[in-house]
Amino acid sequence: MKIMPMYMINFMKKFWPKILSTPIKLLFFSLLYFILFSSVFSCKKENTDIGVNLQNQDQLTLYFNDNTEMYASIAKDDSITTDERSKVLLGSYIDNIFGLSQASFATQFRLSSYNVSFGTNPVVDSIILYLDYTGFYGDTTTMQEINVYRMTQDIYRDSLYYSNEDISTMADLSTSLAQITTSFSPNNNNTLKIQLDNSFGDALIADSLFYTDNDTFLIQYKGLYIASTPVTANGAIIYFDPVSEDSKIVLYYHNDTDDSLSFDFLINENCAYFNLFGHDYSGLIFENNINQDTPVDNAYIQAMGGVKALIHLDALKNWKDSGHIAINKAELVLKINDINNDISEYSPPERLLLEIVDDNDGFDGPIDYFTDNTYFNGYYDETSGSYTFNITQHIQQIISGTETNTSLYIFPESNKVSAERTVIANSDTNKIKLNITYTKFK
């Protein structure tokens, strides 16, 4: 075995504490070290000192640890922001693991042109709300009831709206503009068509004085609330593109001079819109574990602001007492529980994210997240049925004392625009793993 030159040992001993203080420098030198000396040292479990037979006991040593003490619990936020996302969700579904999930949404609609004249004696033939399908989650053959109501409160594109808004104070729920029972068919049709009551079209024609511009129009017509009714079995959440040119309201009418006319009201990128999400976990196996500091054998993760996993890594603080340590690589590995999890019907999220648990508003990801998507990972691997996160820099910060929060939330990247969910195994025989390759400097 080759011995490291003494001048390099002295250099590392002298300057390594300074390197530890800067994450970027740390990453660079850790990778450089690992590349240079991977041929010198082989990885083994903790308690195996690779330099034990060397005459110079000041040699750098490389270790591997995959038994860091940790535990998982289940958490849930009161709400998440849902305004102006890439999709709006509608519908409900029930499965035997996560219970009932439900999605509804509110949106403005705007004029396609100003100062409109509907001609002499205009008569409404029909008025139809079109919503452009982009996907679904669950069983779309289940019949579902959808209602449409008129908004009574102004909503604004530059305001924040949450998944638990009290819609009863924002819409007139006493009068439905439409009530349909339908099985969604996103694979057979491009759009969902909801025929609104003709009286709504009559009002739109009668109020043409408000068509001078959109600001004036929105004073009178504040938007629509499209609501799902909970199913009793199966069901699905449907995804729509709220800014597609195919998502709109079309007023069909005739007058004294033309028997086939139409006018479009647009749902586009200038509209304010937001989703409402609901979950009922009553009677489920994990109901009493939500927001409790209780270790669980299965961590439940669900989009639409549902439950999320909470990983506790408090034991890492003890590493600070072990001298100077450089983390060469740290990977958090989560394997899904495919025994009690119907993957064929409810596919796992394409990607999960980690968030540091603290009191800050907004997303506070580990430093590794901001490096590169490929580096950080978190994508679902179908072959292994697992998710892997590279959190090398984050773990270094914890053991160096620059990061004091040692717990991480885990939730779907698509949290606000999908209904995906999964179960992460954490039993004695199939635990969440933190694989750490590190170097000790004496």
Image (spheres, grey):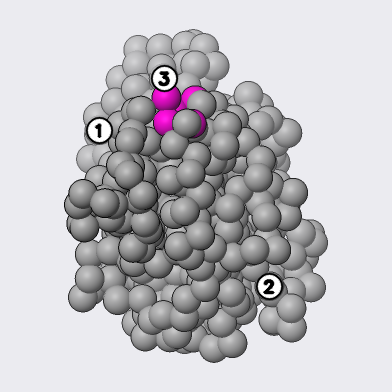
Horizontal side of 407 relative to 222 (left or right) equals: right
Of callouts 1 and 3, which one flags the residue occurring earlier in the amino acid sequence? 3
Question: Mark 1 against mark 2, which lies toward the viewer?
Answer: 2
Question: Mark 1 against mark 3, which lies toward the viewer?
Answer: 3
Q: Is residue 295 above or below residue 400?
A: below
Question: Mark 3 against mark 2, which lies toward the viewer?
Answer: 2
Within 10 Å of disc 1 (Cα), the crowding (few <14, some 14-19, many 20+) is: few
Within 10 Å of disc 2 (Cα), the crowding (few <14, some 14-19, many 20+) is: some
Within 10 Å of disc 3 (Cα), the crowding (few <14, some 14-19, many 20+) is: few
Q: Is residue 150 above or below residue 214?
A: below
Residue annotated with mark 1: 35
Q: Is residue 89 above or below residue 21?
A: below
Residue in the picture at 79% in, 61% down: 292
Point out residue 364 in the picture as x, y percentages from the top left corner: 57, 33
As measured in the structure, the alpha-carbon distance from the residue carrying label 1 to the one carrying label 2 is 51 Å
State the residue in front, 210 or 49: 210
Point out residue 182 in the picture as x, y percentages from the top left corner: 41, 80
Which kind of residue does numbered mark 2 sit on? Asp
Residue 280's tag is 2
* Quarter of the image that includes the C terminus: top right
Point out residue 84 in the picture as x, y percentages from the top left corner: 46, 39
Q: Quadrant of residue 60?
A: top left
Extent of the magenta region? 210-215
Residue annotated with mark 3: 24
Of callouts 3 and 2, which one flags the residue occurring earlier in the amino acid sequence? 3
